Image (spheres, rainbow, N blue to C red):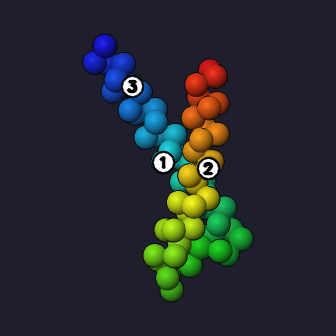
Amino acid sequence: MERDKWQFLLRVTAGYGLTLLIAAVILMMIQKCPWGSDPATAVKRVILVGYPASFSATVLDSLR
């Protein structure tokens, strides 16, 4: 039972981390992520875009 809990936490963390990474890359590609001039705004935008996308990742993971 304990192993399942850690595996669940790992899957959720990995899914959310990967989603945030992809959101950051896409925002940098379209030049909407100002890491150099305003990092606080960049983090907010990545979280704002990544949060709904992580729901999709969680639903797809649960269907598997």
User: Is 48 drawn above or below residue 54 in the view shown?
Assistant: below
Residue type for callout 2: Pro
How many residues crowd around disc 2 within 10 Å: few (fewer than 14), some, or many (20 or more)? Answer: few
The residue that label 2 is drawn on is 52
Q: Position of residue 15 (x, y in %)?
A: 52, 40
Pointer 1 and pointer 2: residues touching (CB < 8 Å)? no
Locate residue 6 relative to residue 24 in the image: left or right. left
User: Is 28 drawn above or below residue 37 in the view shown?
Assistant: above
Instruction: Please identify the quarter of the rendering in which residue 54 is found.
Output: top right
SS at mark 2 in the image = helix
The residue that label 1 is drawn on is 17
Q: Looking at the image, which residue is at 49% across and 68% down?
A: 43
Q: Looking at the image, which residue is at 64% across and 66% down?
A: 27
How many residues crowd around disc 1 within 10 Å: few (fewer than 14), some, or many (20 or more)? Answer: some
Q: Nearer the viewer, mark 2 or mark 3?
A: 2
Q: Looking at the image, which residue is at 63% across and 48% down?
A: 53
Q: Nearer the viewer, mark 1 or mark 2?
A: 2
Q: Position of residue 21 (x, y in %)?
A: 54, 55
The residue that label 3 is drawn on is 7
